[in-house]
């Protein structure tokens, strides 16, 4: 799959339409020089397929390139059909896709003008791995990866006291450290209150946009009135994967009878495996002992790298 760059757009501040500057310098782990969205984060460069803009124009909207806040408009590549981790080569510049679609917290200028914006649905985002110059007319190609994309994971801690700053989160960092030691790339790690709506929001955002292989939550799996992590997790699930949670309980029962009180679940949304873990650091590590050797096969199946479960 190849495409042609039709526009290179920047803006000096966020929240406004970008202007086609025709040519720009791309800086490693930063983005485009002079663009407000550049920085040390995962959404350094935004891209939209040209046919999506043409489709929007066909509805009577007079929009210029850059109107949706996109940096690059490319004809010939359907970015939405690609996977997170796809490498895009344009001359000396190498981009890695990191997110598909986005949340729209405050509607942009084009939305206020015409009542719609395609960026949340059709835009994709990337980080700059190799720098250089991209200009109109350049050819963009999908570059094969020389090495397998590392397993990507997110860690969410649920704690009312932690969210208020009344308790230090020790479980989330311990989980993230162990994942990194096992070769995972932890793309997000954060703490939220025991709010099921908030957890559902973040699970959907992560699974549908950032698309990690694994999400581990810690806390909110017991009998307390605020312990609603299993319900929030089941609410976003597309398929159940009960064996993992059952295996954790079975192993934990050998350590403490209180393991039977765990209501943790394990599910699948899209290509992401979600597993609830208990709240204590010790119990989290014991739970991870149960599944860390087994889930790479499961994640390989979800990625499509593994074709069957034969021994």
Image: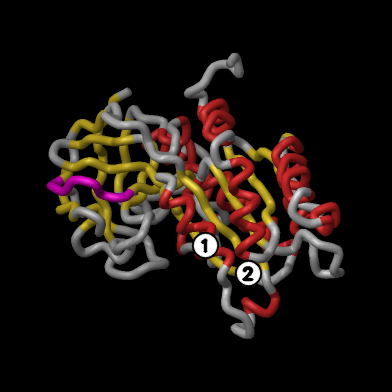
Q: Is residue 155 above or below residue 148?
A: below
Circle 1: element type: helix
Q: Which circle, 2 or 1, is nearer the viewer?
A: 1
Quarter of the image containing the C terminus? Answer: top right
| Residue 82 location (% of width, % of height) | 43, 32
Q: Residue at x 34, y 27 (%)?
A: 76
Looking at the image, is 219 positioned above or below residue 165? Answer: above
Q: Quadrant of the N terminus?
A: top left
Q: Is residue 21 magenta?
A: no
User: What stretch of residues is rendered in magenta?
Assistant: 127-133
**Badge 2 is on which residue?**
192
- The structure residue drawn at horizontal position 68% and vertical position 60%, both measured from the top left corner, is 199
The secondary structure making up most of the magenta span is strand
Q: In whole angstroms, how far apart are the C-alphas of marks 2 and 1? A: 16 Å
**Disc nearer the start of the sequence (2/1):** 1
Residue picked out by circle 1: 174
Side of 192 relative to 248 (left or right) = left
Q: Which residue is found at the position 16% from the left and 48% from the top?
A: 131
Q: Which one is nearer the viewer's eye here, 299 or 202?
A: 299
Q: How many numbered circles are shown?
A: 2
**Residue 12's disc number:** none
85 relative position to 166: left or right: left
69 or 308: nearer the viewer: 308
Image location (x, y in percent) of residue 288: 60, 49
Name the residue rendered at 23%, 56% in the picture.
Answer: 32
């Amino acid at each position: 799959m190849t495409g042609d760059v039709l526009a290179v757009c920047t803006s000096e501040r966020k929240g406004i339409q970008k202007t086609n500057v025709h040519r720009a310098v791309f800086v490693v782990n930063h983005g485009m020089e002079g663009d407000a969205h550049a920085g040390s984060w995962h959404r350094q460069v935004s891209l939209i397929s040209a046919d999506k803009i043409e489709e929007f124009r066909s509805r009577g909207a007079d929009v210029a390139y850059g109107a949706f806040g996109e940096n690059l408009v490319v004809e010939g590549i359907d970015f939405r059909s690609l996977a997170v981790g796809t490498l895009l080569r344009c001359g000396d510049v190498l981009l890695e896709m990191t997110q598909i679609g986005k949340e729209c917290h405050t509607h942009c200028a084009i939305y206020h003008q015409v009542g719609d914006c395609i960026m949340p649905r059709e835009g994709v985002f990337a980080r700059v791995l190799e720098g250089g110059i991209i200009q109109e007319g350049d050819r963009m190609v999908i570059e094969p990866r020389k090495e397998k994309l590392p397993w990507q994971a997110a860690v969410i801690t649920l704690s009312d006291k932690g969210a208020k700053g009344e308790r230090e989160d020790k479980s989330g960092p311990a989980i993230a450290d162990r994942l990194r030691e096992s070769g995972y790339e932890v793309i997000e790690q954060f703490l939220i209150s025991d709010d099921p709506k908030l957890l559902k929001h973040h699970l959907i955002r992560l699974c549908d946009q950032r698309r990690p292989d694994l999400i581990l939550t810690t806390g909110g799996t017991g009998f307390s009135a605020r312990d609603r992590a299993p319900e929030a997790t089941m609410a976003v699930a597309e398929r159940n994967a009960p064996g993992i949670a059952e295996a954790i309980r079975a192993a934990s029962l050998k350590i403490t009878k209180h393991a039977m009180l765990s209501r943790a679940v394990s599910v699948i949304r899209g290509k992401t495996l979600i597993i609830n873990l208990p709240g204590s650091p010790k119990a989290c590590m014991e739970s991870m002992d149960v599944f860390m050797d087994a889930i790479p096969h499961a994640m390989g199946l979800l990625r499509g790298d593994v074709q069957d479960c034969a021994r």
